[in-house]
Amino acid sequence: MDNLARMTPPVNDAGTTASHPAPSPALLFDTINAYQRTATIKAAIELDVFTAMAGAPATAEIIARHCHAASRGIRILCDYLTVLGFLTKSGGQYAPTPDSALLLNRKSPAYAGGTLVFLLSNEIKGAFDHFTEAVRKGSTAQSRGGTVAPEHPVWVSFARSMGPLMVPAAAGLADLIPLDPNRPTKVLDISASHGMWGNAFAAKNPKARIVALDWAPVLEVARENARAAGVADRFSAIAGNAFEVEFGSDYDAVLVPNFLHHFNASDCVRFLKKAHAALRPGGTMAIVEFVPNPDRVTPPAAAGFSLIMLATTPEGDAYTFAEYSNMLAQAGFNPPVMHSLPASMNVAVIAGR
Amino acid sequence: MDNLARMTPPVNDAGTTASHPAPSPALLFDTINAYQRTATIKAAIELDVFTAMAGAPATAEIIARHCHAASRGIRILCDYLTVLGFLTKSGGQYAPTPDSALLLNRKSPAYAGGTLVFLLSNEIKGAFDHFTEAVRKGSTAQSRGGTVAPEHPVWVSFARSMGPLMVPAAAGLADLIPLDPNRPTKVLDISASHGMWGNAFAAKNPKARIVALDWAPVLEVARENARAAGVADRFSAIAGNAFEVEFGSDYDAVLVPNFLHHFNASDCVRFLKKAHAALRPGGTMAIVEFVPNPDRVTPPAAAGFSLIMLATTPEGDAYTFAEYSNMLAQAGFNPPVMHSLPASMNVAVIAGR
């Protein structure tokens, strides 16, 4: 029996007029309770629910058996995963959406469940336990300057968990920046992390050498991934602080993926001047970033990224395209062009020297 | 400059076909990061952002001055409140939506910011720290049986913080159940909490007496609110466990607001039989609840409520209308009718004896 068929209209609609809809606490409660979404996807990944239902739609009982969990727990969990859009439900059976099958089945090459380790780490999620204080200060309330502290261990966790997800975007970036195939070329990968951005350039350009820069323990992860990608013979590394170490010179491209958002605008300009000097004439600067529109409230993922910078860094931000254009101009670059990247919320801001 | 005007299409759209949209990690990241929404609304309420912008649209600088906070922090916070739908932003100025002005300005009589105390209490939010374990067990992983433990202190916090928000729905319920104005009548309010449901019946029916049932410390809150509503002379109380204490008899109505969801179906039937016996012939049972559709995945707020019951109770659930109809039939009631309630995600399921 459909609820709506039995539902009478409210007898008291005080406050409702044609132009003003009835007041509703729905958004408020949904937002206060939003942490339950985090707990739901975390539980689903930890119990491997999406792997359990690979193949065919399954009932809560079948999924529960695969996950060694109570069917009541799985039924309530899967219903809420359906509410959130990770599953579809029909006739008491649950099935993953195409994105869930791709990203959340542990057997998928694009499995992204590992990102929990970084995204829900104490360094990131824990920073939001003090978020009211961060808003009041206008800066992270974490000790040691948040995640930009030297050699912060969270970046090893980032490198280990976020790499696979960056592969399509990295390939897209390499397609955007063709290197000269007729001579040895050289790409500097700043805050290389997992190394996936540089690896994509090495894979596409057989004569390109990649120089990865990051904290020393992070570079171990990049080196492993370069080996796995079969490009270790063209991989070298510079360990240390990107504001302080020597870059070398005559690079064909400098990649700056998800690095500048950690700093204030004048530090970004200082960094970009240093990168400019390391490029050969005609070389390319490629900034990969969360870039909100000028209104700073769209699109949601890029606009929301500044919140993470407020919680976890002293002065970081999600900068607009106009702001990056201005920084690049101050550093001596030509006007940039922005490009979307496949399967990513990042965009590329590309400028020539 | 509009981002879209400078945005080129992705050069690599591997995986994209006309029928399959490109894969996207957007929902996954948005869900993993959803706890940040909770932190955002909590910070906004704690810093009293919505009260600060009462009157006229305001810049981040003006709001920051009112809130004694850094303007950078307020700018990033208010941008994200705009992304979430609590504010609008135009020309660098922020303004509350009508719902935010009603529910989140501390000077509004419908101020709902106090609900944080209950909704983010250790008993509720803390239960989700062990949510994977709750799914595995199919039952709360909290000690002492979760929130249904005898005299659990969370219910005093609930009574103190949730009352004001229930006023429109309580008035709506009283309108749905007219009592005989020509004789003394009697209403039993089960898990009375703040007492707002009973108070609405007392206010509308001058000859009605209200008997509130709850744990003894909670009844102090109901008594205060009855006094504030000017109906204390028609208010009395029964302290204890609703499954065990004597109800008395000859009630014209029994109100059961947000109580049955804490228990399994057979305990609900046992309770409803006891309530049936306490009603006079022709009396009315009024269940107020989160009632999902038969698919259990719509509407979102009612469907999502079962998650809270999994995390915080041994066997509670969000029951469908068919399930409540079945319980009521087993307890001897006539078939129920469901009604929406104003400004509420609760509905009323009303059945005659």
Image (spheres, coloured by chain):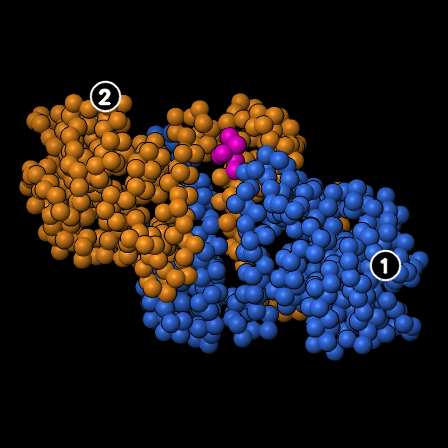
Chain colours: A orange, B blue
**Does residue A219 appear left or right of residue B269 in this picture?**
left
How far from the left and from the top, in percent, is residue B215?
Answer: 73, 60
The crowd level at tag 2 (other Cα within 10 Å; few <14, some 14-19, many 20+) is some
Question: Is residue B32 part of the magenta span, yes or no?
Answer: no
Label 2 sits on residue: A230
Q: Which residues are magenta?
A: A43-48
Q: Which residue is drawn at the image coordinates 76% and 42% (left, top)?
A: B265
Quadrant of residue A287 within the rendered picture = top left
Circle 2 or circle 1, nearest the eye: 1
Instruction: Give the quarter of the figure containing the N terminus of chain B.
Output: bottom left
In depth, the one of B49 and A133 nearer the eye is A133
Q: Amino acid at mark 2?
A: Gly
Q: Which chain is disc 1 placed on?
A: B
Do callouts 2 and 1 mark residues in contact (Cβ within 8 Å)? Answer: no
How far from the left and from the top, in percent, is residue A66?
Answer: 57, 25
Q: Which residue is drawn at the image coordinates 55% and 41% (left, top)?
A: B131
**Does residue A219 appear left or right of residue B25 in this picture?**
left
Q: Which residue is drawn at the image coordinates 19% and 24% (left, top)?
A: A232
Q: Which chain is disc 2 placed on?
A: A
Local SS, label 1: loop
- Say above or below: A320 vs A221: below
Residue placed furthest toward the bottom: B230
Q: What is the CA distance from the residue labelled 2 to the residue labelled 1? A: 77 Å
Is residue A81 visible in this depiction of the protein? no
Q: Which secondary structure type mostly characterizes the magenta part of the structure?
A: helix
Q: Amino acid at mark 1?
A: Phe
- Say above or below: A233 vs A97: above
Q: Which residue is drawn at the image coordinates 11% and 30% (left, top)?
A: A185
How far from the left and from the top, in percent, is residue B151?
Answer: 70, 56
Q: Which mark is residue A213?
A: none
